[in-house]
């Protein structure tokens, strides 16, 4: 079982300067709990829903970019890595998701603890391979 077969794609991501309230709205709209933060096509951080909830408690209505809230550096994984390896990283690093980067360090997916739980519970089947659209 490989990460590429169970990762979520396409990935909803934000830029460093995205205001945290907008990031939170994006999470709710897309029903996700983790947003990779990208800069010039590279993953530079990640924000979880709990990070944004804490930011709302601390900053209120102030406009604060996610760059001030994101966690960095980010643990990432290859689409060719085993699902077991992804699960081990999630547990050992106490994190909820791993951005999936191809050989060119481009963001191609995200694997979350929920994805792993679904596989273990027999609630997920491997996804059909899809071509990744590259941004130019």
Image (spheres, grey):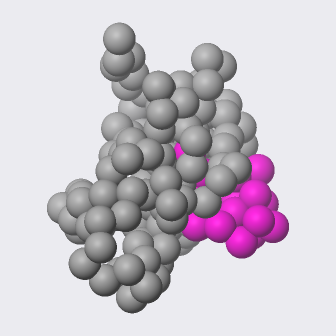
| In the image, farthest residue toward the bottom | 57
- Say which of 27 and 88 sits in front: 27
Q: Is residue 100 left or right of residue 135?
A: right
Q: Can see residue 92? A: yes
The residue that appears at 35% across and 17% down in the rendered structure is: 135
| In the image, farthest residue toward the front | 62
Q: Is residue 97 magenta?
A: yes
> Which region of the structure is painted magenta?
83-99
Locate the C terminus and report the quarter of the image it occupies.
top left
Residue 35 higher or lower than 25, as above or below: above
The residue that appears at 39% across and 32% down in the rendered structure is: 128
Residue 95 x, y percent position in the rendering: 65, 67
Q: Is residue 26 left or right of residue 129?
A: left
Q: Is residue 97 left or right of residue 26?
A: right
Q: Is residue 100 magenta?
A: no
- Say which of 5 and 94 sits in front: 94
Q: On the image, which quarter does residue 2 sit in?
A: top right
Locate the N terminus and report the quarter of the image it occupies.
top right
Q: Is residue 110 left or right of residue 20?
A: right
- Say which of 95 and 52 sits in front: 52
Residue 91 x, y percent position in the rendering: 74, 69
């Amino acid at each position: 079982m490989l990460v590429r077969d169970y990762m979520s794609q396409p990935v909803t991501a934000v830029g460093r300067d995205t205001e945290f309230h907008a990031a939170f709205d994006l999470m709710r709209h897309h029903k996700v709990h983790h947003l990779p933060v990208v800069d010039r096509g590279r993953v530079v951080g990640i924000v979880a829903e709990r990070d944004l909830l804490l930011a709302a408690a601390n900053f209120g209505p102030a406009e604060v970019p996610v760059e001030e809230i994101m966690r960095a550096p980010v643990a990432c994984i290859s689409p060719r890595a085993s699902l077991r390896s992804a699960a081990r990283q999630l547990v050992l690093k106490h994190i909820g998701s791993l951005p999936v980067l191809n050989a060119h360090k481009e963001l191609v997916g995200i694997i979350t603890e929920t994805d792993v739980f679904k596989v273990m519970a027999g609630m997920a089947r491997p996804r059909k391979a899809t071509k990744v659209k590259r941004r130019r």
